[in-house]
Amino acid sequence: MLTPVLKRRSFLTTLLAAGVAPMALPSRIWSAPVGPNDTIRIGIIGCGIQSRGLTSGFLKLPNTKVVAVCDVDTTRRENHQQIVHEFYSKQTQTEFKGCAVFKDFRELLAREDIDAVVIATPDHWHAIIAVAAAKAGKDIYCEKPLTDTVFEATSLVAAIQKHNRVFQTGSMQRSAREFRVACELVRNGIIGKITRVNAGFGGPAKPCDLPAEELEPGLDWDFWQGPAPVRAYNSILSPRGVNKHFPMWRLYREYGGGMVTDWGAHHLDITHWGLGMDRSGPIEILPPADWSTAVSGAKLRYSNGVEVTHVVDNGVNFFGEDGEIFVNRGKIKVTLKGEVKASFLAKEDQPSLNDQLGKLEQELLKDAKVRLYSSTDHKADFLHSIVSRKQPIADAETGARTVIGCHLLGFAYYHGQALKWNPANNAFASGTGDAKWLHREYRGDWRLA
């Protein structure tokens, strides 16, 4: 179980402004469990490009209804509302105007007719909104990387457990067959004892140095920044209009952890799945020699002796005593004792990816003792869990353990120190590190509910 890195009372006393009142949110008793034929009513918080993809998926699933959307940008939230209205109007062949629109997520959470929320905001908002949603009795689908600090990660897990919520982290690679097959091969010892892993994704974040620009009309820029430090508007952080690209706020330390947390939350997640580390974490962090300018090379060491190296090439490569497994989206290559058992690395390759995966399952996993959670649709898996009240494939602690590993990698690039880590209590060990790195001071009245 994850435990907070600092006691809540001590943390609030030390880091938050004295006399700040808690956010006013409804405190209601959760209604009767959602039945298999009941409609699950969903609110969407954050209306950018990632959210549009998620909303499109939820709209198409049975027994669901998107009833509210929320964003601090007028253009994006109204566009999102229009998408919902047009979908249901076409589906029912009658005019639908039942999707409410909000600027403030707290107003959406106050609606007692909403069963679940989807959080797809910039990373610096995830924890505050998710903890508030748990307190308000909502089940939660929250995008990865789960949180912006280590303390937020442990606090979020505690809130989900306290309020008995179903929580799905948006690490959707766990719902893709190639990743499950790769991790089952590793967990069943098909390539022998794992000696090392290469996890490939981009580099760390940097302090935001963007110039001031004229403010986007209809955007509440102060609300967009929320708990983050105040700075002038720049369209790279919050694009103008309805953006068709992924905004690069994720490259700056005030709002994210660079590609180390962005893509790292995908590939370190698969690394943990393969190594069986969903309830643990590294015990040592080693920076590269050129840590202040490096974009790769940091290492995580785990209690089983496996060393995970952050590399540039995208994907995850497991190295065992008897072979090697490479996996990425739509790609896999398995080599066992010098023989290539399966390889699909390009769209033109034959046999197809599914044929190759089927071959691996039939030849190497037919009598497997370890069977991993099998999901084919990350959003549907979340909805099934709302009904069953069982945690889905990427629950809160799974997402927290992954993002904590990413943050520890980030510390290697930010501080250049060899660090010892105790994953049992989520604290630095052996006199290394600084507890101040585990969180940041929130601006104004913002706090974890």
Image: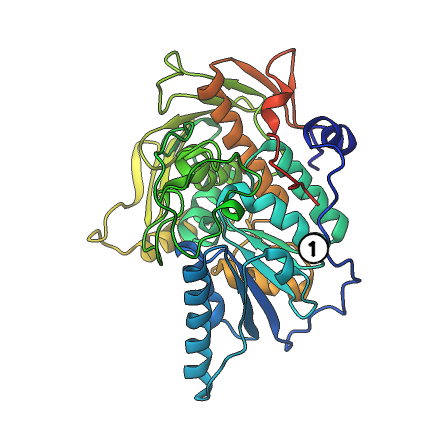
Residue 369 shows in the view: no
Residue under numbered circle 1: 165
Quick one: 340 or 169, which is closer to the camera?
169
Q: Picture coordinates of residue 414 (x, y %)?
A: 46, 20
Q: Is 424 on the left or on the right of 214, as rendered?
A: right
Residue 386 shows in the view: yes
Q: How many marks?
A: 1
Query: Hey, which residue is sitting farthest left in the picture?
Result: 348
The quadrant in which the N terminus is found is: top right
Query: Hey, which residue is sitting farthest bottom in the picture?
Result: 94
Helix, strand or loop status at disc 1: loop
Quick one: 97 or 290, which is closer to the camera?
97
Q: Picture coordinates of residue 232 (x, y %)?
A: 42, 38
Q: Picture coordinates of residue 288 (x, y %)?
A: 40, 15
Identified by mark 1, the residue type is Arg
Q: Is 230 on the left or on the right of 316, as rendered?
A: right
